[in-house]
Image (cartoon, grey):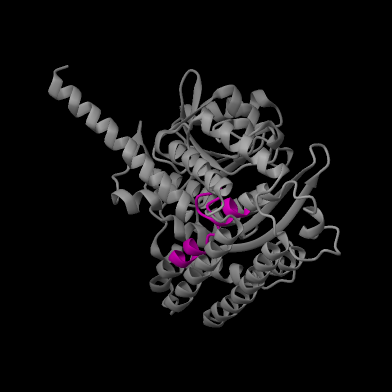
Amino acid sequence: MGRVGLCRERSIVTSKKQLKARVRARMAKTGESYTAARRHVAGVSPARGDAGWTFRGGRHPYSAAIDSVLAHHGVEAGEPLVFLAGGGLGAGYILWEFKHDDSRHLVLGFRNQWQYYDRWMAKTLDRLGVAFEAHRTAGAKGAAKRLAEELDAGHPCIVLPDRQVIGYWLLPPHLDGHGGHPVVAYRRDEADVLVDDRGQAPVRVPAERMDAARARVSSYKNVLHVLRPGEAGPGRLAEAALAGLRDCVEHLSVSSDSFSLPAWRKWSRMITDGGNAKGWPRVFADGRGLSGALLSMWEGVEPVGMDGGNLRDLFADALDQAAPLLGLPLGEPAAEFRHLHALWHDLAEAALPSDVPEFARMRELTAAIRESLLSEGTASPEDGRELWELRAVVDREPPVKDTGALFADLGERIAGLYRAETEAVARLRSLLPER
């Protein structure tokens, strides 16, 4: 290679590194998803592909997986309407305490029926008019054989592996068996299953690791969905959107304080209640595990996280797209849910402020792992080790000293979100036609 060619190649490599650094910095600063951050930094990029599969990105792993497979079959529904067809938004809060490793694990749910994978998949696909086959195979050999047969026949499969066991998210051993989210397995070769996890590049997973990850969680062991879609015209999409809207407002209007909007009210109280055994002042009385919970809040609420964030912006996009299909004035509710998305962002910023050096570094490392994984299909093990080593340090001694003021602020914000979301859902309900 001549000097000019070598200089050009070095320039390309340098510009790619600079782009990656800018995207990572924006993700860490704003909590945006990889796709949104890259769009702000570099504009809209052409879609990339692999052996006939097109990487479409996406925000929410559940709706993105369905949308990607539908598009592969020539059915253009779009992620927002897929998300709406499934019932749109949900709400959920659980703080787990595990004695075996003295850990605390915060779980937030933002999708309709977030605790039931099979039910959500079935009703979403049924409403969209998508024929599908759902398989559960008890034995590992049978599950591996079925996946291999479908992939060899050219059928992309939606599978649900455990995040820690599958490996590429660089999670530590103590998160083994904590669950995961759906991904699309779209082809295989002699050694690996190639996966689309809302990125722009294939993620290579050794076949044995994929088999183990699919079998790890008993409640959805070896589950596999194969879609056989036909046409989904505007009429069917309109029916699905209206059914999803009705499902959403009904689901968010029930009294459950674990799986509906009252979960936010419960959370706002638990975060300040020093007299309750599950109250944050008692659970985190010695500070242990608090920093991890705060990072989990940031990751769970913001689109930079593995689950796509609070999803209020995705729901707003769905309302905008559903409005002309249904002939309903959904523009104002869409704006209202975008405002709620911003309020959730403010909560995440208050929980894990970037002016705390340790928190800033945790955000940077989280963004670095996400950016590399989604842009290149692999992330740096060094980043994973540093992140979890830092988490272990700050989990023992949190950098936040005035936890009383922190909990009071977060509790007030969460209570405000409960009130605002309750009012927004009531207004949305008033716009829907009677049955």
Locate residue 205, reporting x and y percent.
52, 27
Report the side of 435 relative to 105 (left or right).
left
Residue 409 higher or lower than 76, as above or below: below
Q: Please identify the quarter of the rendering in which residue 428 is found.
A: bottom right
Is 396 displayed left or right of 237 in the figure?
right
Q: Quick check: is 303 in the magenta stretch?
A: yes
Q: Position of residue 332 (x, y in %)?
A: 45, 78
Residue lying at 53% horizontally and 60% vertically, measured from the top left: 311
Q: Is residue 1 left or right of residue 197?
A: left
User: From the viewer's perspective, is residue 60 above or below residue 222?
Assistant: below
Tell me the quadrant of the picture where the C terminus can be found. bottom right
Tell me where residue 407 appears, x and y as whole percent: 70, 63
Question: Residue at 63% of width from left, 74% of height from top?
Answer: 416
* In-image side of 402 versus 309 (left or right): right
Whether residue 57 appears in this view of the structure is: no
Q: Residue at x 61, y 60 (%)?
A: 112
Q: Is residue 410 above or below residue 293?
A: below
- Work out which quarter of the rendered image holds the N terminus and state it: top left
Image coords of residue 86 (percent x, y): 56, 59
**Residue range (magenta):** 297-318
For the residue pair 257 and 149, the one nearer the viewer reads as 257
Q: Residue at x 53, y 48 (%)?
A: 360
Q: Is residue 309 magenta?
A: yes
Closest to the observer, 97 or 108: 97
- Residue 42: tell me if it is visible: yes
Tell me where residue 48 sits by quadrant: top left
